[in-house]
Image (tube, helix red, strand yellow):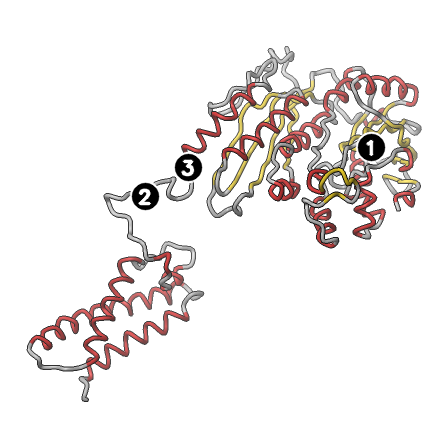
Amino acid sequence: MRYRPCEVLVAGLYWCHSSLRDYTYNSQVHLARALDTLLDCAYNAITALYHYSLFCMALRLVRSPYILLIILARSHLIIKKRYLALNFHSSNPSQNWLLTPSDITMPATQDQGMTYAGAGVSIDTGNELVNRIKTAIATTKRPGADATIGGFGGMIDLQSAGYKEAPILVQATDGVGTKLKIAFALNKHDTVGIDLVAMNVNDLVVQGAEPLTFLDYFACGKLDPEVATVFVEGVADGCRQAGCALVGGETAEMPSMYADGEYDAGGTATGAIKHGDPILPAKDSMVEGDVLLGLPSNGVHSNGFSLVRKILEKQNLDFKDKAPWNDSISVGESLLTPTRIYVKPCLEVVRRGLTKGMAHITGGGLLENVPRMLPDSLASEIDVTAWKAPPVFQWLQKAGNVATTEMARVFNNGIGMVLVVSADKASEAMFVLQEAGEQPVQIGKLVKKDDEACVLKNMESWR
């Protein structure tokens, strides 16, 4: 059978385009646009031959299997033009040449407009969440802040809060970190909100500031009102413990930004110091012989979880397995124990003038956080046998073969807050802290600095 050259040319052009497009998935935009032009040329040529072929078939002038090929080729090109619309608005335009099952959907028309919900963001779900959390948020109100939400910003009346003159404002911002991974795994979200507040307000109080307000930020790929509600209820719990009002926040639903069932959270706390009250640390008043008091932690708190998870992975432990350091509870439940909030006990010693400085023991551990409150001329000397660390730390060190120095600069190892007090006021400070519900321990003293800013004695006892 003899074929017309034009038929062979057009068929070859079409199959050339089909082959070339397989190599353009990662090409530059200009190559994709060049193939777009090729596709248009092929479409126009095949359309002309399509009508010519129908005419010839009607007159029985041509009998060629390539007529069927031309008809099929034109049909395929129509599909390509209709469903992909030669769209070059994606981040990788060359991918628009790949026809996948997800592309075979009817395009939006004037009668079928696109919606925000269809794009993955539900305003109605966001409104539902606001209604769910209003009651919990209202429980955090305090003088100067009524803890109502729905406006464009949170407010605090400083005079009603007890500050007749403009105070010094102190702000802190922080997150929970990869501890959230455990909350995802266990579908347990009621404690990490407390962690979020603790990580911020504990940083305020060490400067002598009273926490007044808190703002939270909750970001996810798809908003689950149940999960978000439980999380915010935890934030409200933390705010009540700290005595600050939850005056607002932001819930961001961002499709494709987070894995299903996961979220991230951040928070910002604002506190105040009255003019005339001490701003801590009072480095100029610190001297050799000042006493270091430690307030116990109740576990890992919210730092070092990337290392914790690596150790668990090495030991083939799941978050739902029994904790090797406490067989009455699971690994995950133990690790989700929330960070302690030290605000109220610490404010008591601040208001009574019993402390010269405080350090919140977070990332960096004792080795790096205690020196932050000290003058350059002094160092802290701490005896680690003065307290009994929670058993989780000994297990982590052994299971991960973690060096004692590394333990000291990653974890709190049982001490979540350190205070500097004068030797002659140590007993009074301990009594005040005990009255506030704390169990303070004298863990060391200030000494003249030689090389190291924090000297940990008897670290071999951790092994």
Query: What's the residue at 56%, 41% (across, down)?
Result: 263
How many numbered markers are drawn?
3
Query: What's the residue at 62%, 13% (across, down)?
Result: 161
Of callouts 2 and 3, the N-terminal one: 2
The residue under label 2 is 114
> Depth check: 271 or 427 in front?
427
Q: Residue 121 appears in which quarter of the rendering?
A: top left
Marks 3, 1: nearer the viewer: 3
> Depth check: 283 or 53 in front?
53
Instruction: Residue 385: give x, y in percent of width and height.
Output: 91, 37
Circle 3 packing at 10 Å, graded few (<14), some (14-19), many (20+), is some
Which residue reaches farthest front? 328
Q: Which mark is residue 122?
A: 3
Circle 2 packing at 10 Å, graded few (<14), some (14-19), many (20+), is few
Instruction: Residue 34: give x, y in percent of width and height.
Output: 33, 67
Amino acid type, mark 1:
Leu
Instruction: Residue 399: give x, y in percent of width and height.
Output: 80, 51
Q: Is residue 243 above or below residue 13?
A: above
Circle 1 packing at 10 Å, graded few (<14), some (14-19), many (20+), is many
